[in-house]
Amino acid sequence: MASIKSTGISDQYQPFIKVYLDNKEPYDIRITELTSSVIIADGLEDKKHFCRILKRSEANCNALSITELETSVGGVFFEKQGKKLKRKIEVLGDSIICGFGNIYNEGDPLDSITLYEDGTQVYGAMIAESFGADIRSTALSGVGVARNAGDGKGSGGALGIFVAEDMRGSEKNDFSYKPDILIISLGTNDESAEKDEMKEAVKRLLKTARDGYPDTYIIWSYGLMSHIQDEAISEAINELVLAGDDRLYYFLHDTYKESEGGAGLYGHPKVATHKRAAAELSEFISDITGWK
């Protein structure tokens, strides 16, 4: 049994956890009380079991912490199992990387936004799994590069996740992770940004990323919801590549397709679209890195 303490519970933003038990299909648990003890597994055979717990919904909607773990009488916890992963991928993104609306189907009730958000079924996580890589993912719904969602001209907007204080918890950028690959999935919320403004913001973010990660492959991934800033992003990246950055790439995806079930909640890509994006980027990553 896991005792889970949560803050800021509301009907619309109740957090979800996903439980992976042995080799069974993972299952979801909805946290409905401010402080609660939640049984994550029951009636198990008396032997060693493997259990992994992930938070499915984004921290922007609700903070969540596991304060203690309990077992039935006679049960014991073992040290973390498994080998240390050598490959590292970092993903910076917005609501797409949060998985916002990716498990929503038309006609589903909208009593809770987090009900249709599964951050474990997004293309960044899928790519990491396909390559057997560790992943660090930082994402926030509504965040942009030049402007956040809904920001008007002159509002200041966002400067990208690397320099957004509320994303890192401090003004100091954290470059300790040292990923082999950095995927930047941003630009969708910058619809109101002018071209020159967007180009400058993209360059500023990429310069910060390159200064912190001089040897990392950086891939800017864009297009699953909109192509409005394609020209600005591609031109900014091309200029940096021509200036000498030979480990910087731009990947433009098609928007969601009807054959993938169309769009999820508020036009966001569904799981099928994430799978397609993961396959596309995985092939691209193999080409530039030799990873198999």
Image (spheres, rainbow, N blue to C red):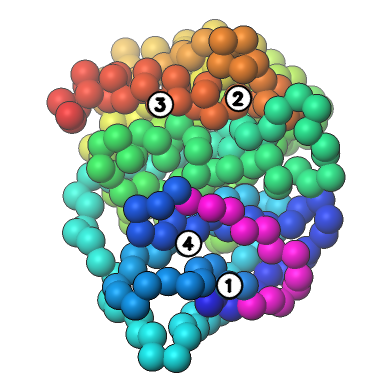
Disc 1 residue type (three-letter): Ile
Contact flag, marks 4 and 3 (Cβ < 8 Å): no
Which is closer to the viewer, label 4 or label 2? 4
**Residue where numbered disc 3 is placed:** 278
Disc 4 residue type (three-letter): Ile
**Residue where numbered disc 1 is placed:** 39
Horizontal arrangement in the rendering, residue 14 relative to residue 204 (left or right) = right
**Percent of width and height locating residue 210:** 35, 36
Circle 1 — which element?
loop
Circle 3 — which element?
helix
Which is closer to the viewer, label 4 or label 1? 1
Contact flag, marks 3 and 2 (Cβ < 8 Å): no
Which residue is located at x 41 percent, y 17 percent?
251
Residue 222 is a magenta residue: no
Can you tell which mark lies on residue 161? none
Q: Within 10 Å of the Cα at label 2, are there few (<14), some (14-19), or many (20+) other Cα atoms?
A: many
**Bounds of the magenta segment:** 26-37
